Image (spheres, rainbow, N blue to C red):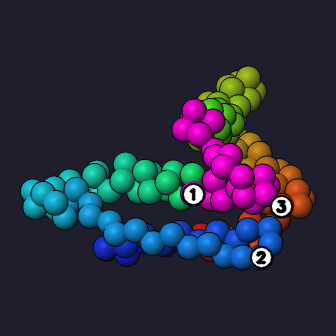
Amino acid sequence: MIRSRSHIVMCVRKPNKEIITNVEKVRTLAQKHRALGVPFIRGIIALPETLYFGFKGLFFSANAAVESESGGESEKFTYKEFAVAIALALGVASLFFVVPFLLATWLGLTGILFNVAEAAIRLTLFLAYLAAVASWGEFSRVLQYHGA
């Protein structure tokens, strides 16, 4: 997925090596309403818009994967299934914040030592997560193509 000022392009590689592309014209709120183009306000408006376009890209990708698995039948990834997937992802992501805090608190640390321990625990969890994801077949391919 890549975005310019006026367009968003999403490309997905199907298991049969075919690449499908979706190009959409984009008109942001800051472009529609001049008052929202002020630098600080524009940044606040850009956050939910970027989140929306990211979810839209994930939805496009999920539907492409579901179609290729079902042999092109009319099975689609529904908004309800997508909401459940996002809720689960947010729940797992919250563990990266809650678990390090609780462990550092359990150790009875305070001040700068608390912050260093919490950061070390968070980094260890993140690196363990990346190692686990990288060892999983399909996700290792995602990491090869991911440019961020």
User: Compared with residue 96, is residue 9 higher up or lower down, i.e. above or below?
Assistant: below
Circle 2 sits on which residue?
A: 17
Nearer the camera: disc 3 or disc 2? 2
- The mark that comes first in sequence, 1 or 2, is 2
Q: Mainly helix, strand or loop, the magenta region?
A: helix
Percent position of residue 147, x then y: 62, 74
Identify the magenta region.
60-83
Circle 3 sits on which residue?
A: 138
Percent position of residue 35, x then y: 9, 56
Please indicate whether residue 13 sits to the left or right of residue 36 in the image: right
How far, Cα to Cα, is label 3 from label 2? 14 Å
**Which structural element holds mark 2?**
loop
Q: What residue type is labelled 1?
A: Phe
Which residue is pictured at 68% across the width and 46% down the height? 75
Crowd around label 1: few <14 · some 14–19 · many ≥20 (10 Å)? some
Q: In which quadrant of the rendered image does the C terminus lie?
A: bottom right
Circle 1 sits on which residue?
A: 60
Work out whether residue 109 or residue 126 is closer to the camera in this orientation and state it. 126
User: Compared with residue 99, is residue 124 higher up or lower down, i.e. above or below?
Assistant: below
Which residue is pictured at 88% across the width and 56% down the height? 136
- The mark that comes first in sequence, 3 or 1, is 1
How far, Cα to Cα, is label 1 from label 2? 17 Å
